[in-house]
Image (spheres, rainbow, N blue to C red):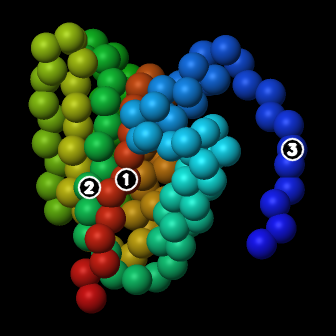
């Protein structure tokens, strides 16, 4: 396989995060870590289909931001056909973790998670899916 070399410019904070990722995952170098991140992204993109899947959307945001809660509720109310349950957990550091259990086509769940993760004030968001059949 032919290997191409290219240059990447990163802010200091992102470079530090990449180096931590390399160390935590015991990659021999940054190139291997970047390959793994790209491959993981490719796998996640394959979920952009109509397979029936179940999963969870996890969101973390500051507890006091009512506009985040309101927007999350508005979006969820448009996707009641795929939402099985929604639970909020109040964390020690004045943050809330919201776990939304979902079942539906991968495309629909990805669409829903993108909308929720994109809410201004969401500090972290992740969709986890598993094929049902």
Badge 3: how crowded within 10 Å, few (<14), some, or many (20+)?
few
Q: Closer to us: mark 1 or mark 3?
A: 3
Q: Residue at x 42, y 52 (%)?
A: 113
Badge 1: how crowded within 10 Å, few (<14), some, or many (20+)?
many
Which mark, by number, is residue 37?
A: none
Element under disc 1 = strand
Residue 107 location, x and y as percent? 48, 71
* Residue indicated by mark 1: 127
Residue 48 location, x and y as percent? 53, 71
Residue 122 located left or right of residue 133: right
Q: Closer to us: mark 2 or mark 3?
A: 3
Which residue occupies the extreme front position in the image? 28
Residue 15 location, x and y as percent? 64, 23
* Residue indicated by mark 3: 6
Dots 1 and 2: beta carbons under 8 Å? yes
Residue 14 found in image quarter: top right
Element under disc 3 = loop
Asked if residue 88 is positioned above or below residue 42 in the image, the reply reads above
Q: Earlier in the sequence, mark 1 or mark 2?
A: 2
Dots 2 and 3: beta carbons under 8 Å? no
- The answer to whether any part of residue 41 appears in the image is no
Gap in Å between the C-alphas at discs 2 and 3? Answer: 36 Å
**Quarter in which the C terminus is drawn:** bottom left
Gap in Å between the C-alphas at discs 1 and 3? Answer: 31 Å
Q: Earlier in the sequence, mark 2 or mark 3?
A: 3
Element under disc 2 = strand
Asked if residue 55 is positioned above or below residue 89 in the image, the reply reads below
* Residue indicated by mark 2: 56
């Amino acid at each position: 396989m032919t290997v191409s070399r290219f240059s990447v410019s990163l802010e200091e904070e992102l470079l530090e995060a990449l180096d931590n990722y390399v160390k935590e995952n015991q990659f021999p170098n940054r190139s291997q870590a970047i390959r793994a991140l790209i491959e993981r992204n490719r796998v996640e993109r394959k979920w952009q289909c109509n397979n029936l899947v179940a999963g969870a959307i996890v969101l973390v945001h500051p507890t006091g931001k009512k506009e985040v809660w309101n927007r999350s509720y508005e979006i969820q109310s448009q996707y009641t056909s795929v939402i099985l349950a929604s639970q909020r957990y109040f964390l020690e550091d004045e943050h809330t973790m919201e776990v939304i259990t979902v079942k539906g086509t991968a495309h629909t769940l990805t669409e829903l998670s993108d909308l929720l993760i994109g809410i201004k004030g969401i500090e972290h968001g992740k969709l986890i899916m598993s094929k049902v059949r």
